[in-house]
Image (cartoon, rainbow, N blue to C red):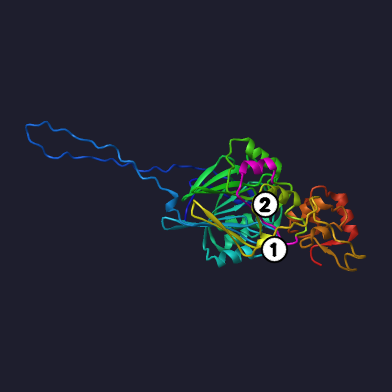
């Protein structure tokens, strides 16, 4: 299994990461000297050593690359991407995000692909729809290294991940803009974050993978503001395939960013008929207006790109046309309310309720509902104080309403 040149070990202690040290080393290629032994000549002639011109070493080209497969896994309203390839007899596997916390589809998919070892498992940010099954991944497969942004969360999903990192003795690293790595023939350039300040989505780990002449970009849930920060620096974001940020939300994919990336293919991950209205109409119009083929897991199922480093092909489980339900307001249109949304004696389970259902709870509007979903799971309704804007007085109102619950 590939081991990176720079690793940092993590110790879990009351949800605090202690990052220890770091090291880097450069590989050196042994030089080859060529000697020429002159032929024997008559003694009357002076012996001259004839040195031939230096022989240029043959440069490895993409002709020698094996096939890289990039799996944009259909995991509903969540994210997970698998990269798999071989080089010089070694297998390499990278997992970028791990689906939602209340499912096991990522584990099942990896097992179906006969994956047993993962070189790097990356959680772009602490949201439960990105790191959801990462603890199970560490418990199920042999993982060499885990990359996280360094931002934290009080969610049980994040706490379980920290415990899994410690219990499985997995190396830990927090990548930053400008970092460069080589995993066999695959180059990884870190585009973001520059630093962290507990802005989870905005400071998502954003990466450019380059395999021969073909490149891929992933930005997690980074916002348009952060995309502009990426392209304002000395960062090369030109790529063939762009994974749209934040499930195709209009909070991501700034026109200037799209122009700089100039992708030939755009892909988004979203759940069918999801309550967010992803992908948003503005983003779909932007992509299609630029004549860029658009694929989505909600329409096409799992999407696989195969490349030999020179050319690539896009394979889908099924064909379809992207027709987002969004009206452009940033949220899916609400269905007409029935006279009674919640039956008498029932409650709204804050761990499973939809975006619309959550807004039946007092003081929970669209933004707080989305924040709540991203902070799942909760062990009690008292943990709703983790949501920005919900303090003790509003918590009292929620309890008095007697509508929110964690079971029911």
Relative to 261, residue 49 above or below:
above
Q: Circle 1 sits in a helix, a strand or a loop, which is it?
A: loop
- Judging by the rendered image, the residue that carries numbered circle 1 is 102
User: In the image, is residue 254 part of the stretch drawn in magenta?
Assistant: yes
Q: Circle 2 sits in a helix, a strand or a loop, which is it?
A: loop
Relative to 203, residue 319 above or below:
below
Tell me what residue is drawn at x 67 percent, y 64 percent.
Answer: 103
Residue sitting nearer the eye, 82 or 173: 82
Q: Position of residue 407 (x, y in %)?
A: 79, 66
Which mark is drawn over residue 379?
none
Please give left or right for residue 209 compared with residue 89 in the image.
Answer: right
Residue sitting nearer the eye, 118 or 404: 118
Distance from disc 2 to disc 1, alpha carbons, whole Å, reads 15 Å
Which mark is drawn over residue 126?
2
Tell me what residue is drawn at x 66 percent, y 42 percent.
Answer: 257
Earlier-in-chain disc, 2 versus 1: 1
Q: Quadrant of the C terminus?
A: bottom right
Residue sitting nearer the eye, 31 or 174: 31
Q: Position of residue 262 (x, y in %)?
A: 61, 44
Q: Quadrant of residue 300?
A: bottom right
What range of the chain is rendered magenta?
253-273
């Amino acid at each position: 299994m590939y081991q990176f040149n720079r690793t940092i070990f993590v110790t879990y202690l009351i949800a605090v990461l202690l990052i220890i040290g770091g090291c880097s080393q450069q590989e050196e290629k042994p030089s080859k000297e060529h000697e020429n032994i002159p032929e024997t000549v008559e003694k009357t002639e002076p012996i001259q050593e004839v040195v031939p011109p230096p022989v240029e070493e043959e440069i490895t080209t993409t002709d020698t690359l094996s096939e890289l497969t990039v799996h944009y896994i259909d995991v509903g309203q969540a994210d997970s991407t698998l990269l798999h390839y071989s080089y010089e007899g070694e297998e390499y596997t990278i997992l970028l995000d791990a689906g939602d916390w209340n499912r096991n589809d990522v584990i099942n998919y990896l097992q179906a692909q006969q994956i047993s070892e993962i070189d790097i498992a990356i959680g772009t940010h602490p949201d439960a729809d990105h790191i959801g099954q990462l603890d199970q991944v560490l418990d199920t497969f042999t993982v060499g290294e885990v990359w996280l942004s360094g931002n934290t969360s009080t969610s049980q999903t994040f706490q379980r991940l920290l415990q899994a990192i410690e219990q499985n003795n997995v190396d830990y690293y927090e990548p930053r803009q400008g970092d460069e790595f080589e995993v066999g023939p695959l180059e990884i350039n870190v585009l973001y974050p520059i630093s962290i300040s507990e802005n989870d989505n905005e400071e998502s780990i954003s990466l450019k993978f380059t395999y021969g002449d073909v490149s891929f970009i992933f930005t997690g849930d980074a916002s348009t503001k952060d995309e502009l920060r990426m392209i304002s620096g000395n960062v090369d974001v030109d790529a063939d395939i762009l994974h749209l940020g934040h499930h195709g939300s209009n909070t991501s994919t700034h026109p200037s960013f799209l122009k700089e990336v100039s992708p030939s293919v755009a892909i988004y991950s979203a759940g069918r008929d999801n309550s967010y209205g992803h992908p948003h109409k503005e983003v779909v119009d932007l992509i299609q207006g630029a004549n860029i083929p658009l694929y989505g897991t909600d329409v096409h199922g799992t999407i696989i790109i195969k490349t030999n480093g020179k050319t690539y092909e896009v394979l889908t489980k099924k064909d379809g046309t992207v027709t987002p339900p969004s009206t452009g307001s940033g949220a899916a249109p609400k269905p007409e309310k029935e006279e009674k949304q919640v039956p008498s004696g029932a409650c709204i389970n804050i761990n499973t309720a939809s975006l619309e259902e959550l807004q039946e709870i007092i003081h929970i509007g669209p933004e707080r509902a989305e924040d709540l979903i991203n902070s799942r799971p909760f062990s009690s309704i008292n943990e709703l104080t983790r949501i920005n804007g919900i303090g003790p007085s509003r918590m009292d109102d929620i309890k008095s309403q007697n509508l929110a619950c964690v079971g029911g």
